[in-house]
Image (cartoon, rainbow, N blue to C red):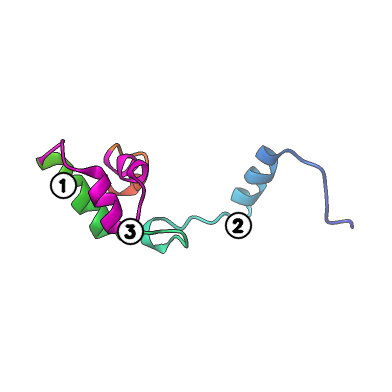
Amino acid sequence: MDNLQWCTSQENMAHCINQNRRNTCKGEKHRDAKVTENQVLAIRRLYKINPKFNRAEIARKVGLYDSGINRIITNKSWKHLL
């Protein structure tokens, strides 16, 4: 057990970053992605054209919750597509 040491989660994350072991998959490449980049861009365009569009209906069509659509619109998720 010489390869183990006690550290905080912050220290552990810093170590991962220094060792290039952090998973940096974004967008469609991320294993939990439910929408494509084209869908994200379409959702944002739709909102820009009509800010009162039905988020719940769009969410059902793409397989997300309303909150997921809101996070896309407000750029809290899929930030790399600004």
* First in residue order: circle 2 vs circle 1: 2
Find residue 45 and name its label. 1
Q: Percent x, y for residue 41?
A: 22, 52
- Tell me the quadrant of the picture where the C terminus can be found: top left
Q: Is residue 38 above or below residue 68?
A: below
Circles 2 and 1: CB atoms closer than 8 Å: no
- Residue 56 magenta: yes
Locate residue 13, reporting x and y percent.
63, 45
Q: Give the magenta part as a residue range.
A: 50-73
Q: Give the x, y percent position of residue 30.
A: 44, 60
Q: What is the spatial separation of the Cα atoms under label 2 and label 3, in whole angstroms?
A: 26 Å
Q: Could you tell me which residue is drawn at 33 percent across and 58 percent down?
A: 35
Q: Amino acid at mark 2?
A: Arg
* Label of residue 21 in the image: 2
At mark 1, the secondary structure is helix
Q: Amino acid at mark 3?
A: Val
Please indicate whether residue 30 sits to the left or right of residue 1 in the image: left
Question: In front of the other: label 2 or label 3?
Answer: 3
